[in-house]
Amino acid sequence: MPELVEQMYCSQQIVIPPKFPYILKRFCKAAIKTQPYDLLRWSFEYFKALAENRPPPVKLRLEYPIYSTEGGLTRGCLKVIAHQLLNFGKNLPLYLIRKAWRGFCLDPNELRRIFCLCEVYMRQDYVPLLHFIAVAGGMLTKNLTYTMILLCEVLTKEPDGGSAAIPADDFLDMYLFLARMDASKDIKYLNGYREGETPRSEEEEIEEEETLSEATVDAKLKQLSSYKVQDKAEDGMVAGRQMSITSGEFIVQHIEKEIMDYIDEQIAILPDPDLKKKKAKPEEVEMVRNLLYDFLDENMDIIVPEIEEVEEEELPIPEIVVVYAVPGIGPPVPEEMICDIEEYIADVSKSQADLVMPRNFRHFLSPPLEKFEEYQYEENKKEELACSGVFTN
C-alpha cells in the first residue's frame, strides 16, 4: 500500500468505474425513500441484495410519518416484504422472513410477537406467508375491517389508486385466520405457547405411541392366556370368571400359595408329625412367623420391586414473550358472522373472476366483518338544586 501511494502523483491516476456514479445515485435515492433507522446496517443489506441479484429493501416512495409502530413497521415496508417473499411459495422457512425483516432494520422483538400470534415461534420452522402478512397488517390498523382493506392494498398487483383486487381464496384464508384469533388483550407466551397451554413434547408423543402398542399387545396376550376358572375352594377363585396370568390378583394368590407350601414343608420336618392336629404353642407360632418373615425378606424384591429415587432435574427458564393487544385483529368473530362473510364473498367473486376488492365489503349489502361493540352513553342527569337558601344575582 505505501508503494502505491508513492507512485500516485495526481488525481488522474485514480481509476473510477464508469458505473460508480449511477450506483451511488441509486443508493442515495433508495436511502432517502426508505429512511432506515440504521444506515450502516441497511447499506450492508442493500448491497448484499444487489450482489445476490434479488430485490433490495427499498420503499416505493417516502412515507410520512416515518414510523407508525413501535418496531418501525410501515405500510411501505410490509408491501415490499410481501412482494419479496411471494416468489418463494406459500409456506416459507422462518430464516427467509427474518432475512427480509432484517433488511429494513426492523425490531426483532416485533417479529417475535408476530411469530407467536402465528403460533410458529419455537414450534415450527415454517410459517404460511399469508398468515404472517395478515398478522403484520393487523399491527398497523385499528380494527379488523381496516386490516382487510390494508391487506388488499398490499397484496394486489394493480397500480396504486386501482381497485386493489386480490384472489378470493387468499382473502378468505387471511380473514378466517384473523377472525378466529383472540388478540384483544395482552398475552404471555412461554417458549412459543400461550400461558396456560400444556405443550406436548416429542418424548410424550413417542411414549403415548409405545403405550398404545404395548396395550394392544397386552390385550392380545390376555385374550390368549385367559381361561375360565372353575368353582374350586383351594384355588380361591370365583367360578365362571376369566382371570389372566398377568393380573395382580393371580400373582398375589400364587405367592400366598407358595408361602403356605413352604410353611407346610417346614412343619413336616418337625419331630412331631401330628403338630397340625394339636393346638399350636406360642413358641411354635413364633417359629412359623419367623419362617414367614424370612421368606418375605428373601423375596421382597420380587414381590415389591424397589423404585429408584430419581433426582428432579431443574427445568430450564422459559423464554417469555409478551404480546400486547392488537386492535387491528381484536377479539374472535362469532361463527355466524364468519359463515355470512364466506357466503357473501363466494357470491360476489363469481362475477369478478374470483377476485375480491375493498369496495365489496364496504358495500351496504355486505355483512360486517367484525362485531362492533356499542358504547352505552350515560343519560343526562338533571342538576339538583338546593331546597333552602336564597338566590341572589
Image (cartoon, rainbow, N blue to C red):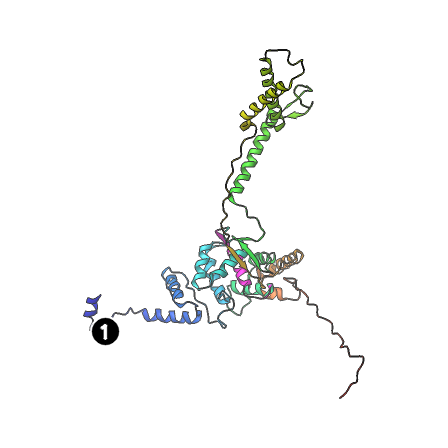
Q: Which residues are magenta?
A: 125-143
Whether residue 322 is visible: yes
Between 207 and 176, the residue placed more toward the observer is: 207
Q: Amino acid at mark 1?
A: Gln
Q: Is residue 137 magenta?
A: yes
> Would residue 129 be counted in the magenta stretch?
yes
Name the secondary structure under disc 1: helix
- Point out the image quarter for the N terminus: bottom left
Pick out the residue farthest to the bottom. 393
Identify whether 233 is placed above or below 193: above
Residue 245 vertical placement versus 61 (above, below): above
The percent coordinates of residue 364 (x first, y second) are 66, 66
Q: Is residue 10 left or right of residue 310?
A: left
52 to the left or right of 287:
left
The part of the image, by quadrant, that contains residue 337 is: bottom right
- Regarding residue 165, the answer to whether it shows in the image is no
Q: What residue is pinned by disc 1?
A: 12
User: Badge 1, how many Cα within 10 Å: few under 14, some, many 20+?
Assistant: few
Q: Could you tell me residue 72's position as x and y percent?
A: 48, 66
- In the image, residue 269 sits, relative to residue 208, either above or below, namely above
